[in-house]
Structures are given as structure tokens and as C-alpha cells.
């Protein structure tokens, strides 16, 4: 009888603040380990860091190479229902920029995905990108600022630039000069981890 009472008491205790769940990585080829084995990608390295730090979270990588914010906005509701994440790492927009797509539409798509995630009670980490200077100063400045403004508007966590600390290092990119090498993946993971870790407490 005493054991039964103890069991009931234990299962009724509130979960600790660090109790985990699913972290949904929602990005493009930069998050999908393009040209690499999946184990080498930063999303897999993130899972290893979570395991090492004994945080009970599972990483689900729903990133698709070539994905734009329009495609992401189209499938966000389905992805949220499929994975039931506690945290959404939203890392889209690079392909919009490389294709010179209208920034107003990119902003609207990102806002739609953030709203859907927050409506599903998810904490959101927005991952920013930057465009090369050959796209022109007005476009590159507004592109970068879009992430800052959205993070402020929706009160989300923000990584200002996924490639921070490596963008100028040619040796850290594959032959296409766009996708990071396996050697660069730990740097990407660390850039994400700095902003993600506080969301897991």
C-alpha cells in the first residue's frame, strides 16, 4: 500500500523545468547537411550536445534543400502536427535572398511560420542570414534587418547570422562556395547553441 501511494505521488509531481520534448529544425540545405552525411550535419551535432548535457530533447530535422520561406509556410502546420515540437528552430530565407525574391513576401512567410509555431505553444528560435554584397547595399541591409525586426516583434530568440565567424573562410565551404563543409558544422552548431540553450531551461 505504501509503495502504491509513493508511486501515485511521484507521477503527480510536476515535471522539472528542463523536461524535454522535440526540437524541430525547420530550414533549408544549410541545415539539411547538403553534400555531407547526415551524422556530420550541425543538427546531428546538436543532438549529441543535448545527449552530452543530459537534456531530454530529441532533434527532428525537417529541413529541405532548396526550400524557400514560401514552401516552409505551406507545410508548417503539417510539420507542427506531425512532430508536436516544444521548440522550433526556424532557419529559412537564404534561398529567397539568393533568388532576389521580394523581401516583403519573405517577411510575411516567416511571420506566418512564427505565428503558427507560437500558436502551437512552441518556443521559437529565428536563425538569420546575410546576403553577399553583390546584391546591393539596400537589399542586403533590409534582408538582414528583417530577422532582427521579426524577432523583436514576436519576442523570439535570435541568431543574427548562422554563418557567423566562418563566412569569410573559403576553406570552410564546399566547391559551390555556398554550403559549409563537415569541418564547419561544429561552428554552426555552436552559433545555434548559444541562443538555443536558454530556451531549454
Image: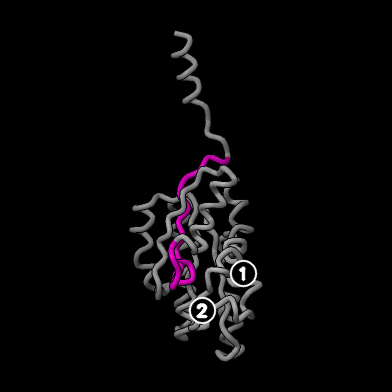
* Image coords of residue 14 (percent x, y): 53, 31
* Magenta stretch encompasses residue 25: yes
Give 52 or 23, whichever is nearer the viewer: 52
* Image coords of residue 148 (percent x, y): 61, 70
* Image coords of residue 183 (percent x, y): 57, 69
Q: CA distance from mark 2 to mark 1?
A: 23 Å
Q: Which residues are magenta?
A: 18-38
Q: Which mark is residue 174?
A: 2
Quadrant position of the C terminus in the picture: top right
The residue wearing badge 1 is: 160
Determine crowd level at label 2: few under 14, some 14-19, many 20+ residues with C-alpha closer than 10 A: some
**Above or below: residue 94 compared with residue 43:** below
How many numbered discs?
2
Residue at 55%, 66% (x, y): give it.
185
Residue at 47%, 45% (x, y): give it.
21
Residue at 38%, 52% (x, y): give it.
83
Q: Which mark is residue 120?
A: none
* Magenta stretch encompasses residue 28: yes
Give 99 or 122, whichever is nearer the viewer: 99
Q: Residue furthest right?
A: 165
* Image coords of residue 115 (percent x, y): 46, 60
Determine crowd level at label 1: few under 14, some 14-19, many 20+ residues with C-alpha closer than 10 A: many
Quadrant of the rendered image containing residue 117: bottom left
Quadrant position of the N terminus in the picture: top left
**Above or below: residue 137 compared with residue 70:** below
Dot 2 lies on which element?
A: loop
Dominant secondary structure of the residues highlighted in magenta in the image: loop
Q: Earlier in the sequence, mark 2 or mark 1?
A: 1
Dot 1 lies on which element?
A: loop
Q: Residue furthest top?
A: 1
Amino acid at each position: 500500500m505504501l509503495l502504491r501511494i509513493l508511486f501515485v505521488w511521484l507521477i503527480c509531481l510536476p515535471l522539472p523545468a528542463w523536461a524535454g520534448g522535440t526540437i524541430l529544425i525547420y530550414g533549408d540545405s544549410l541545415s539539411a547537411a547538403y553534400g555531407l552525411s547526415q551524422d556530420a550535419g550541425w543538427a546531428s551535432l546538436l543532438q549529441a550536445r543535448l545527449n552530452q548535457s543530459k537534456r531530454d530533447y530529441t532533434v527532428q530535422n525537417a529541413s529541405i534543400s532548396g526550400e524557400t520561406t514560401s514552401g516552409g509556410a505551406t507545410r508548417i502546420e503539417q510539420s507542427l502536427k506531425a512532430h508536436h515540437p516544444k521548440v522550433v528552430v526556424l532557419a529559412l530565407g537564404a534561398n529567397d535572398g539568393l533568388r532576389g525574391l521580394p523581401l516583403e513576401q519573405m517577411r510575411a512567410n516567416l511571420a506566418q511560420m512564427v505565428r503558427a509555431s507560437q500558436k502551437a505553444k512552441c518556443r521559437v528560435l529565428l536563425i538569420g542570414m546575410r546576403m553577399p554584397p553583390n546584391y546591393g547595399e539596400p537589399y542586403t541591409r533590409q534582408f538582414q534587418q528583417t530577422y532582427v525586426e521579426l524577432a523583436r516583434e514576436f519576442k523570439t530568440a535570435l541568431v543574427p547570422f548562422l554563418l557567423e565567424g566562418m563566412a569569410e573562410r573559403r576553406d570552410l565551404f564546399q566547391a559551390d562556395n555556398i554550403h559549409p563543409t563537415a569541418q564547419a558544422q561544429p561552428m554552426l552548431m555552436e552559433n545555434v547553441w548559444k541562443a538555443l540553450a536558454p530556451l531549454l531551461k
